Amino acid sequence: QVQLVESGGGLVQAGGSLRLSCVVSGRTFSSYDSGWFRQAPGKEREFVAAIKWNSATTYYADSVKGRFSISRDNAKNTLYLQMNSLKPEDTAVYYCAAKVPSLGIAPRLYNYWGQGTQVTVSS
């Protein structure tokens, strides 16, 4: 079974930084596209960032462009999300996800998900 485990969440003050990590096991990580999503209380799960299996392409939600950076280390089977200049509105549960390489970044396209890690940004 493919498993994804996030870490690195926590509580930070506005303007601070966090780096989330997601370790993927069960399959060769390089075989998958991957991404980060988040869900705030009372909100739908939304796309944050995505990266192609070969890191050829990255994509970001407008709300995080210039502040967040997605990367991956296939040798370590790990996906990262560097979050800088955090804002209170970034508060959410963050999920990493993976899918068989394909076009698109919609949540419904991802068939493997982590358990989520809480990120809380105080003002």
Image: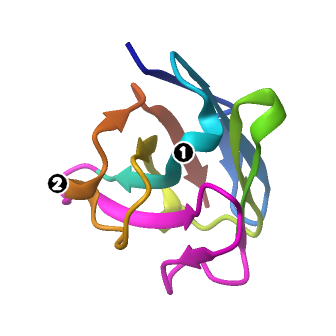
Query: Residue 49: image x %, image y %?
Result: 53, 66
Q: Which residue matches tag 2?
A: 42
Closer to the camera, 59 or 91? Answer: 59
Range of the magenta residues?
A: 41-68
> Which label belongs to residue 120?
1
Q: Amino acid at mark 2?
A: Gly
Q: Residue at x 42, y 54 (%)?
A: 37
Can you say whether 86 is above or below 42 in the image?
Answer: below
Closer to the camera, 3 or 101? Answer: 101
Mark 1, other Cα within 10 Å: few <14 / some 14–19 / many ≥20: many
Can you say whether 25 is above or below 81 in the image?
Answer: above
Mark 2, other Cα within 10 Å: few <14 / some 14–19 / many ≥20: few
Image quadrant in which the C terminus is located:
bottom right
Q: Amino acid at mark 1?
A: Thr
Q: Residue at x 61, y 55 (%)?
A: 53
Colour option used: rainbow
Query: Residue 86: image x %, image y %?
Result: 67, 64
Q: Is residue 88 magenta?
A: no
Query: Residue 115: image x %, image y %?
Result: 39, 25
Alpha carbons under labels 2 and 1: distance apart? 15 Å
- Identify the mark nearer the N-term, 2 or 1: 2
Image quadrant in which the N terminus is located:
top left
Residue 21 shown left or right of residue 73 in the figure: left
